[in-house]
Amino acid sequence: MSLSLIIKREFNAKVRNKSFLVMTFLSPLLMVAMGTLVAYLASVNNDEVNKVAVYDKADLLKPDFKNSERTIYTDLSDLSLDLAKQKASEGYIGLIYVPEVDSLPQLVNKVEYITNETPNLEFVGEIEDVVDKKLTNYNLKVLGFDSEKIEKAQTQSNIHLSKFTGEETFKEGSWLKIILGGASGYLIMMFVIIYGNMVMRSVIEEKTNRIIEIIISSVKPFRLMMGKIIGTSLAGILQFLIWAVIGLTLFFVLSMFGVDVGATSARPEAAEATQQAMEGLPLYVSEFFKLPLLTMFVSFIIYFIGGFFLYSSFYAAIGAAVDSETDSQQFLLPILLPLMLGVYVGFFTVISDPNGTVATVFSMIPLTSPIVMLMRIPFGVPMWQIITSMVILFATFFGVVWFASKIYRVGILMYGKKPTYKEIFKWLKY
Amino acid sequence: MDSILKVNNVVKQYGDYTALNSVSLEVPKGSIYGLLGPNGAGKTSLIRIINQITMPDSGEVLLDGKRLNPEHIAHIGYMPEERGLYKTMKVGEQALYLAQLKGLSKQEAKKQLEYWFEKLEIKGWWNKKIQELSKGMAQKIQFVVTVLHQPKLLIFDEPFSGFDPVNANLIKDEILELRDKGATVIFSTHRMESVEEMCDHIALIHKSNKLIEGKLHEVKKQYRTNTFDVGIAPYNFQQLLADISTKFKTEQADFKTLDDELKLTVTLPQGGTPRELMQYLLQHGEVTYFMEKIPSVNDIFIQTVSQR
């Protein structure tokens, strides 16, 4: 009875808050706007044509620098080197200097790229490729090979992936898994940080408002704490649902719009790219449905609840221990560290080896398991591991709640003291 | 005498610090009970135990003869010294929430709330947020929230702090009315004049121990000093002044009278009676003023606290 009252109040307090409305409806717009901006900026960057000067008196490499969409080469070999340098420093981003040599192989370490900017590594790589190709071909010729025939003899293989069940899989599918797993893990981290903070702030608010003593003369502190955590998480879930609906709607609207643009695009490559993506799409879709979707969904919910409850009881305890948000910093670090660790371990080890030792261990440790395990699940995890990890998570949760509620019970009635870890440890014995 | 609340040998320790050292109290039904003591004496610790906010380490508390249990929450109304409400919540909504937490149904809470809002003439505040109200206004809401669920035991910690004199008087009258309707009131306060004015029973806690408990006038009787304020128009001024100090302990006194007589505070010797003093005075002049000095709660408080 009183628990549901508290949950309702916490939920209403969160949802009716103006910042909740702003966050809920503005942030998807902001995300879309950001995405568009980034895409636009990237395209602006790609549209830019770089002018590069070439100084190659002996005509060794000049023919091999071919103009492309992004780079236009200009020959300045007629000028003297100093004049060419001067000219290049004014109208061009850089000068490729090919010295005169007796035989081509000597060029291997002698070509220079002179520029005042920090050289774009990709472009330097391109220059190196040109030099390498020229020198390799030359070497092959010297050794008596026909470089044209060699080129013809080269093949480009394509490995087909399948399972022992005979099911064909799709290479790009692992990207899908990474994205889905990563997104769920990341989502949980964001949720814990944003809503855990809300739980903490709400505890601090009651403490500074001094209403806390009235409330706990009516309900047990433990119930108040649980009500707060549940109410806040419901508000968070509502926000995520709204985002999901907005996101899906936007996705459909934009994809229809996007296909249209692609088809009528003046640039043939773009149209081709879209077409390719469209051809790939059914594969993605079929791959998507081959994922353990039910397991993913159910475990997302369970890890979401377990992880959020676990962390937010820490947040509640911290809120109870301090008098203002500024004092909470020293206690927040130990909470944020395992969260960060979870995400990093997830992105670095799960992707390279989803069933390796490191990934498996971290998907068992309760503070990181909600994030790491969710990232692993799309790649296929034995059921016993998932269940063990969940059992550990919830067992820890009950332990932490017991511990947090002790701190909470004492802390909410302590005013004006800046607590230390030592002090808080003493509260456990009260 | 029926008691509503019985505290038996309650001990509470915080780490090495003893907040309550085997304290026992008995609060009679229908009384206004003053719980006195300097800061840090243990009053708030005791009140928190009665409200089941904290548990005693040993000892027991009985409400209506039964050990405290969660059902009792609905029968106690508590206004803590550190007051507060949700600043951004609307007054009506907030009061309903708090009343429901005390176990009232929504309809019942609404009914009671309307009664009180009418009574205190604050009907227009229902949809206001606490942060829009003045401190005194918020205090009124706080009072309503405390009494809304018609508790039989009301506990007020420093009830008048923060009220202006008009509102303090209003609240005082409401408290007296609640008492007349059958509620028992526990006051915890430093303001001795309100104790003097309202309480019929007092207890004094000092350094975690209960030192005094009882009916106010009995406590006063116990602390009487046999001291009298005396006004006399002596037949022979010099003679009386010289003589009286040989028989009694006297001091120059200051009280208001109409004439310009000699004013003295006279303390009787061991075993002396007021009658002897009166007879002595009548022999030496015209007695215009004769009154026993009753120890104020303030005197008792200071005397007891400074003794230990």
Image (cartoon, coloured by chain):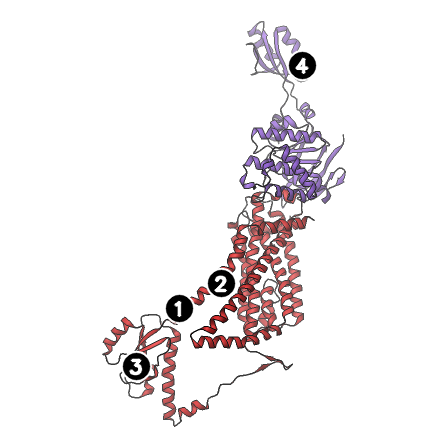
Q: Which residue is mark 4?
A: B274
> Foreground mark, 4 or 2?
2
Mark 3 sits on what residue?
A: A98
Circle 1: is it few (<14), some (14-19), or many (20+) Cα within 10 Å? few
Marks 3 and 4, how far apart at CA: 128 Å
What secondary structure is found at the residue carrying circle 3?
A: loop
Q: Which residue is mark 2?
A: A32
User: In this rendering, which labeled residue sits more in front, label 2 or label 3?
Assistant: 2
Residue to which mark 1 is pinned: A44
Q: Secondary structure at mark 4?
A: helix
Q: Earlier in the sequence, mark 2 or mark 1?
A: 2
Mark 1 — on which chain does it sit?
A: A
Vertical relation: B224 (above or below) A276: above
User: Which chain is rendered purple in the image?
Assistant: B
Q: Secondary structure at mark 1?
A: helix
CA–CA distance between discs 4 and 2?
95 Å
Along the horizontal axis of the image, is A173 left or right of A399? left
* Viewer-nearest of discs 3 and 4: 3
